[in-house]
């Protein structure tokens, strides 16, 4: 399977499609967020963010809330279905697509805008491919919003428009 992915990415890059490499077996692992886990626990660190160094996906919260306002808990509560829909036909799960969206958008955003209350919004269109056939499944814009004070991701989601 890994050889197929490497071959697929090599072919697509060679023809200049500009595909983002799909998560490999060595892709970063997300930390776990349990019910009692601290809101500040880091789930995943994204490096190489222009002008910022690192941005963090934290568990977020508030804890025990049915309406978490930021972090992994917010994405899980409000955007899991969006990412499940984006993953259809790609042979990836929702977290693979969410991770790809965050990593790529933060590292090389098409649009960077200040949002309100000390937040920033980065967006980028990504091409999502079927990992088995290499067929383009969709091109989708993703937005990532994070706080400038602690570089914590508030949310990430597919969108019809850039920031």
Image (cartoon, rainbow, N blue to C red):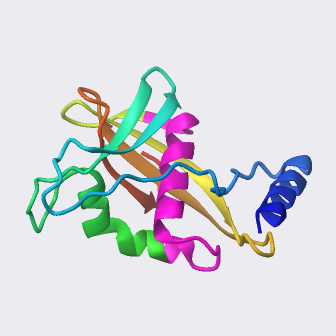
Above or below, 24 relative to 38: below
Q: Residue 50: horizontal and vertical position, in percent?
A: 51, 25
In this rendering, does residue 160 appear at all? no
Q: Is residue 12 visible?
A: yes
Residue toward you, 12 or 43: 43
Q: Residue at x 66, y 56 (%)?
A: 24
The foreground one among 22 and 114 is 22
Q: Is residue 88 magenta?
A: yes
Boundaries of the magenta span:
85-112
Q: Residue at x 48, y 52 (%)?
A: 29
Q: Give percent across and percent down for residue 131.
A: 72, 69
* Left or right of 70, for residue 101: right
Above or below residue 107? Residue 81 is below
Magenta span dominant secondary structure: helix
Q: Is residue 31 left or right of residue 17?
A: left
- Quarter of the image where the N terminus is located: bottom right
Judge whether residue 2 is colored magenta. no
Q: Find residue 58 and report its image quarter.
A: top left
Identified at 55% across, 35% down, the residue is 107
- Percent across and percent down for residue 113 are 40, 34
**Placement of 91 over or under 147, stated as above or below:** below
The quarter of the rendered structure image containing the C terminus is: top left
Residue 77 drawn at (x, y percent) = 25, 68
Q: Residue at x 52, y 48 (%)?
A: 28
């Amino acid at each position: 399977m890994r050889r197929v992915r490497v071959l697929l990415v090599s072919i697509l890059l060679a023809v200049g499609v500009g595909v983002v490499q799909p998560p490999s077996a060595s892709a970063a692992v997300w930390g776990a967020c349990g019910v009692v886990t601290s809101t500040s626990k880091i789930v995943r660190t994204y490096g190489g963010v222009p002008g910022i160094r690192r941005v963090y996906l934290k568990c977020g919260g508030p804890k025990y809330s049915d309406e978490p306002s930021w972090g992994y808990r917010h994405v899980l509560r409000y955007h899991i279905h969006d990412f499940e829909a984006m993953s259809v036909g790609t042979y990836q799960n929702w977290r693979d697509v969410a991770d790809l969206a965050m990593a790529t958008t933060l590292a090389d955003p098409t649009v960077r805008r200040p949002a309100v209350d000390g937040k920033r919004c980065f967006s980028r269109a990504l091409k999502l491919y079927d990992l088995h056939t290499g067929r383009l499944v969709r091109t989708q814009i993703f937005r990532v919003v994070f706080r400038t004070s602690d570089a914590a991701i508030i949310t990430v989601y597919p969108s019809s428009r850039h920031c």
